[in-house]
């Protein structure tokens, strides 16, 4: 394996071929061939512009353009030999162009460097990935919203937790709407990132710009960017667009991991709140009774690599002097990986959630246990003028009494209630039911059915906006 011949064409000062192991270490073609479409789009825009400003003749532009399209057709058809000795996607494409059309291929690289070439290719990819994940996040949001609607009319109740201790009863729909809210922000983060990275670095050249009379606005527009980047060092040396994408991925992953954790718990025998669909669970090779929540466990586990991809690139970037350094070649695999991982997790959840069965009898009964309406009893007293802190104390005593004798609050006798506080009369019975508890929490953003209905309506309207 030698690249002496390519070196004669590209690296005038080298007499000898690169060491084999260095070549292997240096090469990125194994993964950056994924940027082939973006690379050729970038080259087509560049060469068209070189023609427009008179740097290349119309004939040269036509020859190079046809050649690039033929190379692209070969790549798409799988008729392309990716060569390690040609290092990366950019040199593979350019060398294939030269093999096809001869020395005129060498004019493509006029007024351009691989530094701005890779920067523009990778921005094109990352922008498309961000918009695609925004769409997929929205699709899951639509699914979760439909689930919220599905359980609203029956007022299906779920225990609400803090510290994973039963806290207060909530509507299952309210729980779904919490994820709708998170997913809305996740989608927004992808769209914001896509907007901020919507600048073309092409024409920054190696680092300082170029003496050629290029038109950066024309190439930016041809590639669908809002504008060219304003500073050439920044254009080739910055990767915060990728960091922002990876950070939006990491936050979304954290949300999906929390959802996963809840579903894993809720699907256990001990909770018994949900039955996950057969299509999205697996069996055990030895224990016939098992139904494992693999999709959720993997979604939770894969958050680790998605976080790692962000941390990895932050660490790569932090020590590099301006502008381009080869370290930056390490920017791509994490972006590809986070993109692929989340594409599949989002799709799986969009399929799995509507097929998951919620056992309303179990969730409702669980919501009534654990003295979940104790706060409502305290509020009942406070409404009659007892300072809330004092009411809290009184009800705390009642919970202690009930739990010592293995009873619920509604099992306590009138005498016991009155002994705790004279204002605790028969009217308190109503405050003790989970349905009333939920209906009472009608503050803005609360779990009362009317509030949740309102939240669902607002979320629906939000979806009508682009
Ligand atoms: N494969 C390289 C990368 O991904 C392309 C840019 C190379 N530029 C250079 N000056 N060596 O970063």
Image: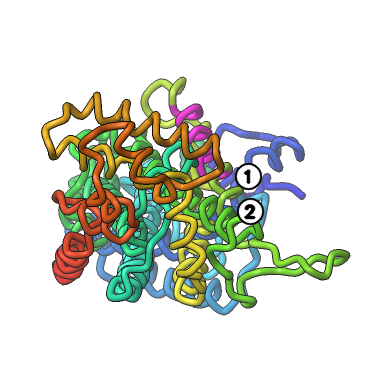
First to last magenta residue range: 305-317
Q: Nearer the viewer, residue 328 or 219?
A: 328
Residue 20, placed above or below residue 451 = above
Residue of label 2? 30
Disc 2 within 8 angstroms of ligand 1 (CB): no
Q: Nearer the viewer, residue 124 or 394?
A: 394
Q: How many marks?
A: 2
Residue 62 in view here: no
In-image side of 385 versus 95 (left or right): left
Relative image position of residue 264 (x, y in whole percent): 59, 56
> Which image quadrant is residue 210 in?
top left
**Residue 328 magenta-drawn?**
no
In-image side of 331 versus 205 (left or right): right
Q: Are marks 2 and 1 in contact (CB under 8 Å)?
A: yes
Disc number for residue 27: 1
Q: Which label lies toward us, 2 or 1? A: 2
- SS under mark 2: helix
For the C terminus, give its image quadrant. bottom left
In-image side of 36 versus 79 (left or right): left
Residue 22 in view here: yes
Q: Could you tell me which residue is drawn at 33 percent across and 56 percent down?
A: 433
């Amino acid at each position: 394996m030698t690249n002496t011949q390519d070196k004669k064409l590209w690296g005038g000062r080298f007499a000898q071929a690169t060491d084999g192991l260095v070549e292997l270490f240096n090469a990125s073609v194994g993964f950056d061939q994924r940027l082939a479409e973006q690379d050729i789009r970038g080259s087509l825009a560049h060469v068209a512009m070189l023609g427009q400003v008179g740097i290349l003749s119309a004939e040269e532009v036509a020859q190079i353009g046809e050649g690039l399209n033929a190379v692209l057709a070969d790549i798409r058809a799988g008729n392309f030999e990716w060569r390690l000795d040609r290092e990366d996607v950019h040199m593979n494409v350019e060398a294939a162009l030269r093999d096809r059309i001869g020395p005129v291929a060498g004019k493509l690289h006029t007024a351009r460097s691989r530094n701005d070439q890779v920067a523009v290719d990778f921005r094109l990819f990352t922008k498309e990935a961000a918009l695609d994940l925004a769409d997929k996040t929205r699709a899951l949001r639509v699914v979760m919203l439909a689930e919220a609607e599905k359980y609203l009319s029956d007022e299906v109740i779920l225990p609400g937790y803090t510290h994973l201790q039963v806290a207060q009863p909530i509507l299952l729909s309210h729980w779904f709407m919490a994820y709708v809210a998170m997913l809305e922000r996740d989608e927004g983060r992808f769209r914001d990132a896509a907007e901020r990275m919507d600048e073309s670095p092409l024409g920054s050249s190696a680092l300082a710009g170029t003496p050629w009379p290029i038109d950066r606005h024309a190439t930016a527009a041809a590639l669908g960017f809002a504008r060219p980047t304003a500073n050439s060092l920044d254009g080739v040396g910055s990767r915060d667009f990728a960091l922002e994408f990876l950070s939006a991925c990491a936050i979304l992953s954290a949300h999906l991991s929390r959802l996963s954790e809840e579903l894993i718990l809720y699907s256990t025998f001990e909770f018994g709140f949900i039955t996950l669909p057969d299509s999205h669970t697996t069996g055990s090779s030895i224990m016939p009774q098992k139904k494992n929540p693999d999709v959720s466990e993997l979604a939770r586990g894969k958050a680790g690599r998605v976080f790692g991809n962000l941390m990895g690139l932050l660490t790569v970037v932090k020590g590099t002097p301006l502008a381009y350094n080869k370290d930056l070649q390490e920017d791509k695999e994490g972006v590809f990986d986070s993109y692929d991982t989340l594409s599949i997790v989002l799709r799986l959840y969009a399929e799995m959630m509507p097929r998951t069965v919620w056992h309303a009898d179990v969730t409702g009964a669980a919501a009534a246990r654990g003295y979940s309406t104790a706060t409502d009893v305290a509020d009942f007293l406070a409404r009659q003028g007892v300072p809330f802190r004092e009411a809290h104390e009184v009800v705390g005593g009642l919970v202690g009494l009930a739990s010592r004798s293995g009873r619920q609050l509604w099992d306590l006798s009138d005498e016991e209630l009155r002994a705790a506080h004279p204002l605790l009369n028969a009217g308190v019975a109503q405050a003790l039911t989970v349905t009333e508890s939920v209906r009472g929490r009608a503050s803005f953003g609360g779990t009362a059915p009317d509030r949740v209905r309102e939240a669902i309506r607002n979320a629906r309207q939000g979806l009508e906006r682009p």
